[in-house]
Amino acid sequence: MDGQHASDRELLERIGRGDERAFAVVYSRYADLVYSVSLRVLRDAATAQDVAQDVFLRVWREPWRFEPERGKFAVWLASVTRNRALDMVRSQGRRRAVEYRPPEDAPEPVDGSAEDPQLAAEVASDTRLVRAAMSSLPEEQRRVVELAYFDGLSQREISERLQVPLGTVKTRARLAMQKLRLTLAGLVTEER
Amino acid sequence: MLTCDETREALPLLALGAVDGEEAGELRAHLESCAECRRELRELEAVASAIALTVPGTRAPESLRARVLTRVHAEHGERAAGTLAAAGVSARVGWPRWWSRRRLWWATGAVAAVVVVGWAAFLQVEVLRLDSRNAWLEREAARSREVAPVLRMLAEGRDVVSLPMEKAPSLESAAAVVLWDPEYSRCSLVIDGLPPPPRGQHYHLWLWGPSGDRFDGGALQPQGGTAVVSVDLERWKRSDYRVVVALEPAAQPTPVLWANLVTR
């Protein structure tokens, strides 16, 4: 596919000029990531597809919203997807009482792009890094982070869900973020 | 107003989006006036963004690809149509977008084809013009090559024999002479007033030997009825021969101009 080895930044510039091929490459690279994040938040395939479509249309319409100096495109895109999915959850007034359980058949990390082995390896490496950082957190800290980030629960809701004092939630969140910050410093500041 | 310490205690959860209500308002108020805390929040938000990468990988459905790309294609068409409309180009309402797009491509292709064809035609004309000029130059050069020996014979004061050529009745108005330099075994034909040959024929130069042998001197190419041809007579040095101009092709080449030379 045309432009499959171009950087994300180059592709976004081309998208800004209305290059559909460049957009198709970006889609191929990140469709799995966007859909996975959307599905993780929404836990519903149909709604997850709607959100994924919205996210990609936003990339098509406003590629300039990504600021390379703020980090990697994959991270930005995943974050945008998460925010959009949470907006969907809130707009539907849905709040899940049941906690998320990851699939048991150890899924592969999102690969970023099957057409660009180098990029796929890079994204997979980033994914492994973040996963390792999350896995290194104590279980109680990780749960606080996941409930806040993926489920969109407020600190008070987390407190109620975990049946721990609000102060404990704050402490766990602070300790978790401190550790993640140290581990992921390079990832969140680099540009592809 | 919250202090920096109080704010920083809450920033991790704010970065994770887990602070709302009144507390969020108080934090925002502090952040507006504290650049250091704002910087801290930005860094924590960047870390939080990366958490999204920890999701289990799931293949996006193929149908999603078609949905997204189709939608983008449609929006692209609208964007292009909007651009054309803004430029004062009217679009036919009711036609499918792919058709408008295809028409645009066809129109672009047609314009490109016209440009290419026009350019090719121009180049063709130029080539023909240059060919014509080259042919003229070659003819002029050939004429110079033919004329040069004549001038040399005259300029060097040689003992040149001038032999008026016999003429057929059809060339009565022509003037033709053979300038012959026996010492150097060269001769030149200088012909003027040569009428155009009949359609399908041309004037041809021959040297006829006494024993029937013939030397082909080539076609005459008169310019405005004038022709100058120089011939090397070395091989005829010791024989009598006849310089002949005949119309060809013909079943029986008939001389229309001729002169008899006798070598020494």
Image (cartoon, helix red, strand yellow):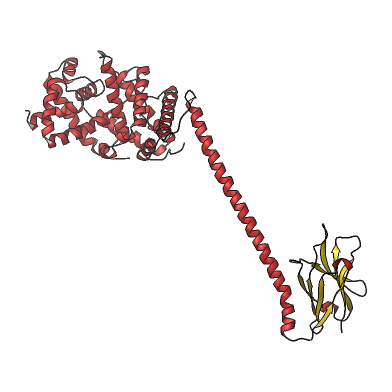
**Outermost right residue:** B211
* Residue B206: x %, y % from top left: 85, 70
* Residue A88: x %, y % from top left: 29, 19
Up-down: is A180 above or below B62? below
What residue lies at 80% left-to-right and 85% top-to-bottom? B183
Quadrant of the rendered image containing residue B151: bottom right
Q: Is residue B188 left or right of residue B118?
A: right
Quadrant of the rendered image containing residue B232: bottom right
Quadrant where the N terminus of chain B is found in the figure: top left
What residue lies at 58% left-to-right and 47% top-to-bottom? B118
**Outermost front residue:** B173
* Residue B29: x %, y % from top left: 11, 28
What residue lies at 82% left-to-right and 81% top-to-bottom? B162
Q: Is residue A60 left or right of residue B243?
A: left
Up-down: is A146 above or below A178? above
Number of numbered discs on residues: 0
Q: Is residue A144 left or right of residue A43?
A: left
Quadrant where the C terminus of chain B is found in the figure: bottom right
What residue lies at 41% left-to-right and 37% top-to-bottom? A117
Residue B217 in view in this figure: yes
- Towards the viewer: A130 or B129: B129
- Towards the viewer: B252 or A19: B252
- Towards the viewer: B113 or B150: B150
Quadrant of the rendered image containing residue A134: top left
* Residue B105: x %, y % from top left: 51, 35
- Towards the viewer: A82 or B34: B34
Residue B54 in view in this figure: no
